[in-house]
Image (spheres, rainbow, N blue to C red):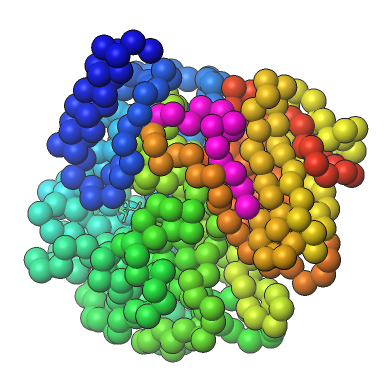
Amino acid sequence: MKLFNIILASALALAATACDDDKNPHPAYVNGTETENPNTPDNPEPGTEVSSSRNEQYRPQVHYTPAKNWTNDPNGMVYVDGVYHLYYQYNPQGNDWGNMSWGHATSTDLIHWEEKPVAMLRNEWGDIFSGSAVIDKDNTAGFGKGAMLAFYTGSGEHQQQCLAYSTDGGLTFTQYEGNPVIANTVLGDFRDPKVIWHETTKQWVMSLALGWDHKIEFWGSKDAKNWEKLSTFTTDAARSNIGQWECPDLFPLQYKGQEKWVLIVSNNPGGPAGGSGIEYFIGDFDGKEFKAMDLAYPLWLDYGADNYAGVTWSNTGDRKIMIGWMNNWNYCGNVPCSPWRSAFTLPHELKLVEVNGSPLLAAPVVSELDAIAGSWTSAADGNVGALDAYEAKFTIKTNETSTFRLENTKGQYLEFEVNGTEKMLIAKRTSATGEVRFNNLFSVPSISAPLNCEGDEMEIHVVVDRSSVELFSTGGATCMTNIVFPIESYNIISGVSGVEYRQLSSIW
Ligand code: FRU
């Protein structure tokens, strides 16, 4: 490239970054620098209608994406009357972060999604930031038996917690006239209310994140309107304190016949691969205080670069199902996707498992994936043929050092190293993977995860879509989600033998 063009490109990139800063007061927005990117999409003008067959380059075929525009965190997930609701941070006016609203999609099987009208738009309390939804079976709030209650952070001059309710099955919401239910004029970061019903103390319990203070506050309420602070959780685990804490979730799971509580905290930019990541603590909750067990924190739900802000559906009984945002604040504003930007992970079912004598939170993909899967077939030479999306499984030796690759016929590949001495799995997201130049933080040459293995062999599963690879060790005790932008899907798995695969049909 000629010198003049390089200078022009740098000037434009700087201008774009400055302009983004003006438009996007969200502190986490794009930490990296936008770099030369021949594929940078033009953002649709506000209000422009973009019809989409959801078949553009890089468009995921088995992961939910809205037809158009920017999206980040999943919000307000609740299951009711056979329908899974997925609300999400959404910009109805463009493909960059801004005008934060709750987009909405529904599913009856967690795999096929139907996009619905935007459920909540920016209001007098500010942007509609992340939050949660519950079903008020006993009419504690007085909006009617079975009303859907949504809690979100109104992000204006201050971040305050607000309540809205729906009596039409989650399509539209009415704002509670007493908002904000938790006022704040002091704290800078105070957001992402996740509400559960705590049966033993017969109250609603809300978890709230205090960003750079590295604290989660728990608040309690009998009527979802009047709240009192119950306690504050924090930790000394050093890595946990590198980033800001966001999007908490608290729920019980069985472990060896006993009830244990899991506290989820999203951490940005302290994540394991740089930028955004989800960590968790395991312990006990008595309706007031969460006490973490003494474990080797930080523990990460996913060691990849692209699983963030994940929380669980409410009203699913003992089953805890999580979905995450498949992106990273380091470069999310520049990923080469248009007219949409960002997908969600596949839903994961969370379980506490014992590995080498310690509890771990495993997050395998939900079994509902079977609905779009063909039958298992063995892949001669690891080649699965020209598929947009598939699941594959194979066995690796955990006591040796080896490499395997997911490749395409254009010579692009994502390489993994198995380090049998350190018992680590390392993904190499280099320029060989495909398009990486849109942001200088996207290439991460070593994304490392503990193998969490007990024997000398373990089964690996990968779910490959057009622009993502989700990797799981046996039972999901190690998860690694990475987005990639290869010119065609990776259809060959090399460096391992005995590959079996099954096609995943497009959900669109
Ligand atoms: C996490 C987050 C939340 C906030 C939302 C704003 O990605 O920063 O803390 O509510 O995004 O879009």
> Is 430 inside the magenta-drawn segment?
yes
Q: Is residue 158 above or below residue 70?
A: below
> With respect to residue 175, does 316 lie above or below?
below
Magenta stretch in the rendered image: 426-438
Which part of the image, by quadrant, shows the N terminus?
A: top left
Taking the spot 26% from the left edge, 66% from the top edge, the residue there is 212
Q: Residue furthest front?
A: 3
Choose between 242 and 46: the one closer to the eye. Answer: 242
**Nearer-the-camera pick, 6 or 398:** 6
| Quarter of the rendering occupied by the C terminus | top right
Instruction: Identify the image quadrant of residue 234.
Output: bottom left
Residue 47 position in % (x across, y down): 26, 22
Instruction: State the residue in front, 186 or 221.
Output: 186
Name the residue located 52 percent from the left edge and 70 percent from the top edge. Answer: 299
Residue 288 in picture, x, y percent from top left: 36, 87
Relative side of 286 to 110, left or right? left
